[in-house]
Image (spheres, rainbow, N blue to C red):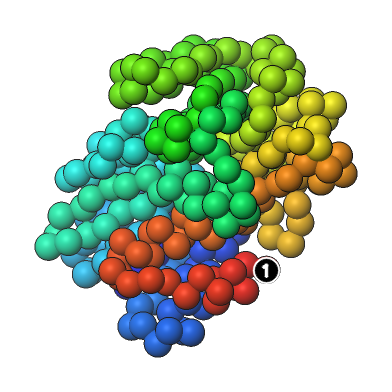
Amino acid sequence: MLGVIGHPIGHSLSPKMHNAAFAASGMNYVYVPLDVSPDRLPAAIEGAAALGFRGFNVTMPHKERIVSLLDEVEEAGRVAGAVNTVLIEDGSLRGLNTDGSGFIEACRAAGVELAGRRVLIVGAGGAAAAIALALIGEGVAETKIVNRTAGRAERLRDRLLFMSPETEVSAGSLDDVEEAASGAEVIVNATYLGMKDEDPVPVPVGCLESQKVVCDAVYRAGKETRLIEAARQRGARVVTGDRMLLYQGVQAQRLWTGQEPDVEAMNDALT
C-alpha cells in the first residue's frame, strides 16, 4: 500500500501515474488518494504505519506541518521545512523532499544545463526551498529568491547560506521580480500561481526571452499554465509542471520499491 495525503485530493494525478507504472511492471503495489483534514493528520499517519503502508506522498496543506510528526527528516526536508514523501520502515516514518531532486531530473531530461547559470526562483515555500538547495548542489552561479513576503524569502536565503556559505544567494520581494527576471537565465515558478485561469503570470511576460529557460512547478491536467504558454510564445525553452510531477514521482517510487520505475508508463498516464 502507498498513497497521497492531502485536502482536497481529488485533483491529484499521482494515483494514475504510479498505478500505471505498477501495472506495467507487475509490481505488487497499489497507490490510493487519501483525503485527510488538517485536524486528522496525526491520526492518519499513525494509521498508515499501523496498516502496513510502505509510504505515502504529502501534498497541500500538510507538507510543512507533517515535519514535526515524523521520526526522521533528511536534509532537503529540513532545509525546506517541508516533506512531500514519507518512507515507512519497521514502523518508523522517514520524511524526504523529492521536489528538488525531481526538478533537477526533469531539467536533465529536457536537456537543460544548470551549472554556472543565474537562476530566479519565485516563491519561498517548501518547494522553492527544495529546488534552491538542489540548484546549489548543481553548481549554479547565482540564486535569487523573490516572494510576496520578503521576510520569508530572506529566511530561506539565510538557511541556504548556513548550509552552503560559499554560494551566492539573494532575496527580495515581488517588487524586485522584473529586475531579477531580466538578469536571470533560468526562471522557476515555485508558487501556486497558475493553478487557476484567473491567476496572474508570476513574472512579467516581457522578461520571458527566447534565450531563457522557464520552469513551472504548477501543473494542470490537460492544460498548460499561462506562464508556460507565454514562454513558449516568446521562444523560451520550458520545463512544465507535469515533468516535475513525473520526476518527483520517479524519485519517490525508487525510494519505496528499491527498483527503477517504468518512467514511460508514468509519463503516458500523465499525458
Number of marks in the rendered image: 1
In the displayed structure, would residue 165 be above or below residue 70?
A: above
Q: Nearer the viewer, residue 40 or 178?
A: 178
Q: Where is residue 87 in the image (x, y as percent from the top left)?
A: 27, 57
Q: Where is residue 200 in the image (x, y as percent from the top left)?
A: 77, 32
Q: Position of residue 133 (x, y in %)?
A: 41, 33
Q: Can you tell which quarter of the image residue 114 is in?
A: top right
Extreme residue in the bottom direction? 26
The residue drawn where x is 15% and y is 55% is 92
Q: Is residue 24 positioned above or below 2 on the image? A: below
Front residue of this view, candidates 65 and 220:
220
- Using residue 112 as the reference point, say whether residue 140 is left or right of it: left
Q: Where is residue 151 in the image (x, y as percent from the top left)?
A: 49, 12
> Given the current orientation, which residue lies at the most extreme right position?
233
> Mark 1 falls on what kind of element?
loop
**Residue 270 showing in the rendered view:** yes
Task: Tell me what residue is drawn at x 69 percent, y 12 percent.
Answer: 175
Which quarter of the rendering shows the C terminus?
Answer: bottom right
Report which quarter residue 26 is drawn in: bottom left
Amino acid type at image mark 1 = Thr
Q: Considering the image in quadrants, where does the N terminus appear?
A: bottom left
Instruction: Classify residue 64 as left or right of residue 267.
Output: left
The residue pinned by badge 1 equals 271
Seen as rendered, the residue at the extreme front is 116
Q: Which residue is drawn at 69% across and 20% down?
A: 183
Neighbourhood count class around disc 1 (C-alpha, 10 Å): few under 14, some 14–19, many 20 upward: few
**Residue at point 34%, 30% (across, down):** 79
Is residue 42 something one can see in this rendering? no
